[in-house]
Image: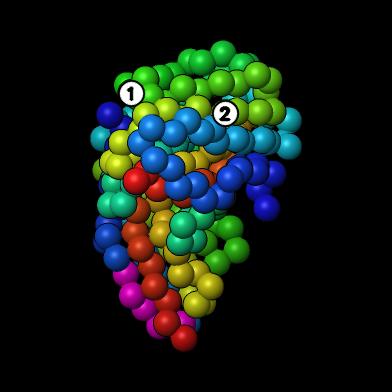
Amino acid sequence: SQQGEEDPQALSIQEGENATMNCSYKTSINNLQWYRQNSGRGLVHLILIRSNEREKHSGRLRVTLDTSKKSSSLLITASRAADTASYFCATGFQKLVFGTGTRLLVSP
Amino acid sequence: ETGVTQTPRHLVMGMTNKKSLKCEQHLGHNAMYWYKQSAKKPLELMFVYSLEERVENNSVPSRFSPECPNSSHLFLHLHTLQPEDSALYLCASSQEGLSSYNEQFFGPGTRLTVL
């Protein structure tokens, strides 16, 4: 299956620092998405990167994709306490497959 | 707000009860999904409806019964559940098409506790 696996499982940083999360998957993809989930809430789509793209930016988010290594990274720059959440990568088209997520804690 | 609403937000039920979860999307999408999220497990896709037809049933026990009466509404009927079915149930919708990339919009979820 195209299961995404995020790394690290948990990350604790101070406000203002950058946070980097990684995702690995197993099979070829058309695109990879990153989602965010605040505790006990629904997921919110952050960014989608297509298989023919290597890097994409959206505000303080930077996503890279390396299809040769079957991996992606999500970088959040100048983190804020409000960025505290779980972050998931997902692959697939109609049937999205999510990883277990990275729990990010940003302390003031 | 993502344009996807779910009710109720919290539900506590006994194993012999029958209840239903409701999801409504206001985005004009043509596909809807049910997911189950348990502690320390990846998000599990349960059902997919595309154009009101079920296209995916991911080996879900028959005590979970989905219904999609139209493209805006999705239900999950629950009966004789087990305590291990306690989880956060998430509904999502998306617009499927040749030019779309299946960004999914999630509701806030229903926190289900089975006693």
Q: Position of residue B19 (x, y in %)?
A: 51, 33
| Residue located at (26% from left, 35% from top) | A26
Q: Disc 1 on helix, strand or loop?
A: loop
Chain holding disc 2: B
The foreground one among B28 and A61 is B28
Instruction: Name the kind of residue labelled 1 in the image.
Output: Pro
Instruction: Name the kind of residue labelled 2 in the image.
Output: Phe
In 3D space, how far apart are the residues under numbered discs 1 and 2 (Cα atoms)?
16 Å
In the picture, measured across the screen, residue A60 lies left or right of residue B84, that is right
Q: Position of residue B63 (x, y in %)?
A: 38, 24
Magenta span: predominant SS is strand
| Residue located at (39% from left, 73% from top) | A105
Q: Position of residue B100 (x, y in %)?
A: 61, 29
Q: Which mark is residue B12?
A: none
Q: Position of residue B71 (x, y in %)?
A: 67, 23
**Which residues are the magenta region?**
A11-15
The foreground one among A52 and B80 is B80
Which is more N-terminal, label 2 or label 1? Answer: 1
B98 shown above or below A75: above
Residue highlighted by disc 2? B75
Residue highlighted by disc 1? B61
